[in-house]
Amino acid sequence: MASRRRMLLKVIILGDSGVGKTSLMNQYVNRKFSNQYKATIGADFLTKEVQFEDRLFTLQVRAICIAFLILITCHFYLFMNMYEQGLNNGVSIY
């Protein structure tokens, strides 16, 4: 049996409060949607494994509220550096 190559991909979803960042993330990772709105405080994080050809990808998906980033403006650059390290893709929703 040939071993699969593993690869880590990081994706960040940014947007204002209430636009559906967590709903989008849950729909993609868990294939679930809830009609009940529950605000996420700060950031949310899920992982999903996806196989494509001979590669196994581990997706780390983070949903972050822009208002949360504004609240921690004094630590904004440190916070974004933590999330940006190895970041492969980003999605902005509004």
Image: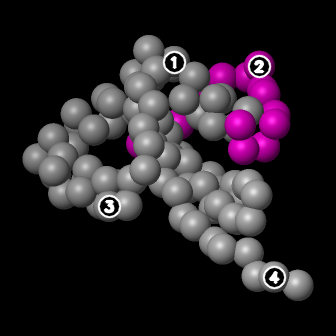
Q: Are marks 4 and 2 in contact (CB under 8 Å)?
A: no
Indicate whether 85 appears above or below 74: below
Q: Position of residue 8 (x, y in %)?
A: 54, 64
Per the image, label 4 sits on a secondary structure element best described as: loop
Residue position for label 1:
19
C-alpha separation, residue under disc 3 versus residue under disc 2: 34 Å
Q: Does 31 lie within the magenta span?
A: yes
| Amino acid at the residue labelled 3 | Gln
Which residue is at the front of the view, 77 or 4?
A: 4
Which residue is at the front of the view, 19 or 8?
A: 8
Residue at position x 45%, y 31% in the image: 91
Q: Which mark is residue 2?
A: 4
- Residue 45 visible, this orientation: no
**Mark 4 or mark 1, which is nearer to you?**
4
C-alpha separation, residue under disc 4 versus residue under disc 2: 43 Å
Indicate whether 88 appears above or below 34: below
Residue position for label 3:
85
**Mark 1 or mark 2, which is nearer to you?**
1
Give the residues in magenta. Answer: 28-43
Q: Are marks 1 and 2 in contact (CB under 8 Å)?
A: no
C-alpha separation, residue under disc 3 versus residue under disc 1: 25 Å
Query: Which colour style is shown?
Result: one colour
Left or right: residue 1 compared with residue 80: right
| Amino acid at the residue labelled 4 | Ala
- Which residue is outermost to the left? 74
